[in-house]
Amino acid sequence: MPIYEYECLNCGKQCELIQKFDEEPLSVCSDCGGHMHKLISHTSFILKGSGWYVTDYARPDKKKSEVYGEKPSAKPKSKTETKPKAEATAKN
């Protein structure tokens, strides 16, 4: 069950309440009887690092450079030296 944070608009009291999703939200302050509203707060879940998606969920056929949006570097064409074929028949 999630923890919801509420704040009273009248007295400023803040409280946390564990509620089910289908429960009615808290609307009346227990101290002054004022109107309560839900607060939106940060979570403690933070993703850091080079990227959890790339390491865990990326398709195996993609290279890291493609996933990160980098263009593949142009590889210099390697020169293959062709050697003259040796003659198989001997001249007499």
Image (spheres, rainbow, N blue to C red):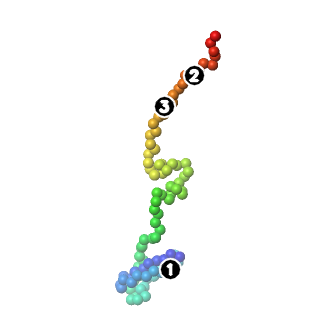
Q: Disc 3, disc 2: CB below 8 Å?
A: no
In the picture, the disc for residue 69 is none
Vertical position of residue 23 compared to residue 33: above or below? above
Answer with the quarter of the image where residue 76 lies: top left
**What amino acid is labelled 1 in the image?**
Ile
Vertical position of residue 44 compared to residue 13: above or below? above
**Which SS class for mark 1?**
strand
**What amino acid is labelled 3 in the image?**
Lys
Q: How many marks?
A: 3
Instruction: Find residue 40 and report its horizontal and vertical position in percent.
Output: 42, 73
Mark 2 and mark 1 lie on one chain; the one further toward the N terminus is: 1
Rounded to the nearest angstrom, the CA distance separating label 3 from label 2 is 18 Å
Residue in front for this viewpoint, 30 or 41: 41
Rounded to the nearest angstrom, the CA distance separating label 3 from label 1 is 70 Å
Instruction: Find residue 47 and report its horizontal and vertical position in percent.
Output: 47, 63
Point out the image quarter for the C terminus: top right
Vertical position of residue 36 compared to residue 53: above or below? below
Q: Residue at x 36, y 85 (%)?
A: 11
Instruction: Find residue 65 and report its horizontal and vertical position in percent.
Output: 47, 49
Mark 3 and mark 1 lie on one chain; the one further toward the N terminus is: 1
Q: Is residue 91 left or right of residue 11?
A: right
Disc 2 designates what residue?
Answer: 85
**Which SS class for mark 3?**
loop
In the picture, the disc for residue 79 is 3
